[in-house]
Amino acid sequence: MTRIVYVNGEYLPEDQAKVSVFDRGFLFADGVYEVTSVLDGKLIDFDGHTKRLTRSLNELDMRAPCDSATLLEIHRELVTRNDLVDGMIYLQITRGAPNDRDFAYPAPETEPTLVLFTQSKPGLADSPMAKTGMKVISIEDQRWGRRDIKTVQLLYPSMGKMMAKAAGCDDAWMVEDGAVTEGTSNNAYIIKDGTIITRNLGTEILHGITRAAVLRFAREAQMKVEERPFTVAEAQAADEAFITSASTFVMPVVELDGQSIGTGKPGPVAARLREIYLEESRKAAI
């Protein structure tokens, strides 16, 4: 089946979907995006993603192409047209395509570009890695200073993924001023003596939607949560570690820079958090 994508008001076969060569997303990475997971044909954490999208647009003084109700209709239509059971829907908005390249923002009446596409991931919630855990390396965080805005500027995270791959690992945790910020496409956590520790919100990290849900569920389950920076050494000495993201949910981390974390196997707290997150998110899916 040919995948159907959405481009500026039209549902098109992917080989017919095009944007202008003058689009500012292509020329300047002048755009934002969101990723919403789909389980059993339903959207996970959709409201959280649309709220963060609005925040990202506002931070960049970028006009929204439509309201959240319309975005919901588009998401659901893409699920239907692509027979999507488990997977993700990627949404990207750019500042549009003026008639030529210019560093200055285009005229306010320039229409934003809106693109959405699906990725089918059968068995998304049953990833084998949840049972074996991830291996990560640490790298210097060389991204721009506004990581709280979910922009399409993903070159350095891509480089980080490749550094990890070259080292025979699954991902990289970025480090700035001696402390871990986050993973290349996820938020990072350690667990020590029963306390879940993760970087506090700020401009240094993305305000993860899955992060917010997992921390809420953890507190509701009477787990202790501490939001603060932690070092690589702390992580290596932790009892457990894990990441969260829209596509991985809660995923254990068992090794950092070649050193095992805890027993070197996924621990009980991360496993329980994954179980709770999937159960509660499926209940609330739309």
Image: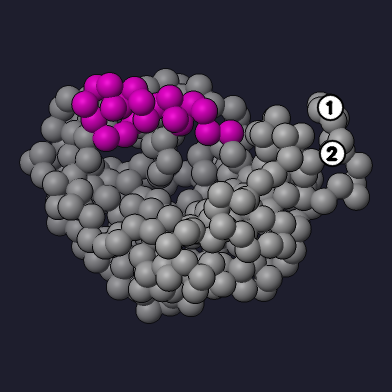
Check the image and report above or below for 141 versus 273. above
Check the image and report above or below for 150 versus 37. above
Q: Based on the picture, tell me whether residue 44 belongs to the magenta stretch.
A: no
Quadrant in which residue 40 is drawn: bottom left
Amino acid at dot 2: Pro
* Residue carrying label 2: 98
Q: Position of residue 141 (x, y in %)?
A: 46, 24
Q: Residue at x 70, y 30 (%)?
A: 28
Q: Do we see residue 168 in this rendering?
A: yes
Q: Nearer the viewer, residue 179 or 183?
A: 183
Q: Main secondary structure of the magenta part?
A: helix
Q: Based on the picture, tell me whether residue 164 belongs to the magenta stretch.
A: yes
- Quadrant in the picture for the N terminus: bottom left
Q: Nearer the viewer, residue 139 or 189?
A: 139
Q: Position of residue 145 (x, y in %)?
A: 60, 29
Colour scheme shown: one colour
Q: CA distance from mark 2 to mark 1?
A: 9 Å
- Extent of the magenta region: 153-172
Q: Residue at x 14, y 46 (%)?
A: 132
Residue 102: which disc? Answer: 1
Is the residue under label 1 in contact with that under label 2 (CB below 8 Å)? yes
Residue 98 relative to residue 18: left or right: right
